[in-house]
Amino acid sequence: MAKSIFYSFHYEHDVHRVQLVRNINALEGQPLLNPQEWEEIEGAGNAAVEKWIHDQMAYKKAVIVLIGKQTASRPWVIYEIEKAWSDKKPLLGVRIHGLSSLGKTDSAGVNPFAKAGIENDVPVFDPTRYDNSGKIDSKATYNRLADNLEGWSSQGKVRW
């Protein structure tokens, strides 16, 4: 694996898509918590979630926001974006709505960097591919992501 990455994403909606990204094995990400582990941290309050984020992000070389349909609406994703930007970590987005989750793809979500006020400063890569009928081709999307994820990870923007 190449680079140590912190992945930011909407757990409940996109965990299956995120697992596909992790299975590419191009990058090393933080541990993927199971729902009970996340509930335990979240149940301990905001300070516990912030500590977990800080601890997981501390030694990562970059932050990749995995952008699904609802990612921009998640307060902890926005917090992670703002923290990465403030900490001057390379930051980028990768759209994952075109990956299959339990046999279904999704529509594209709003750019979460806009909500954080840095939309024009952070690159967003979209591996989504379509078939001849205009429907998302999840397999082709996955293959494009697998071919490009490592290279994209080195193109994150840093706040100066």
Image (cartoon, helix red, strand yellow):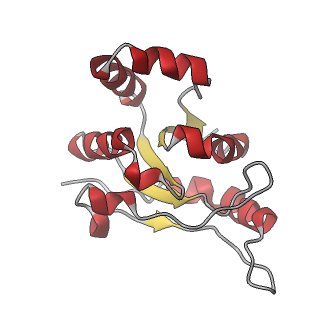
Nearer to us in this view, 157 or 31: 31
- Residue at the bottom extreme, as displayed: 132
Q: Residue at x 55, y 34 (%)?
A: 29
- What x and y, as percent, mark residue 21? 66, 47
- In this rendering, would 85 be left or right of 142? left
- What x and y, as percent, mark residue 100? 74, 55
- In this rendering, would 62 be left or right of 153? left
In the picture shown, does residue 12 fall above or below 125? Answer: above
Q: Classify the position of the C terminus by image quarter.
A: bottom left
- Residue at the left extreme, as displayed: 160
- In this rendering, would 10 be left or right of 123? right
- What x and y, as percent, mark residue 139? 80, 63
- What x and y, as percent, mark residue 86? 21, 43
- Quarter of the image for residue 42 reads top left
Q: Classify the position of the N terminus by image quarter.
A: top right
- Quarter of the image for residue 31 reads top right
Give the total of numbered labels. 0
Q: Residue at x 70, y 65 (%)?
A: 144
Nearer to us in this view, 137 or 57: 137
- In this rendering, would 115 be left or right of 123? left
In the picture shown, does residue 63 fall above or below 67? Answer: above
- Quarter of the image for residue 32 reads top right
Q: Residue at x 24, y 39 (%)?
A: 87
In the picture shown, does residue 133 fall above or below 84? Answer: below
In the picture shown, does residue 33 fall above or below 155? Answer: above
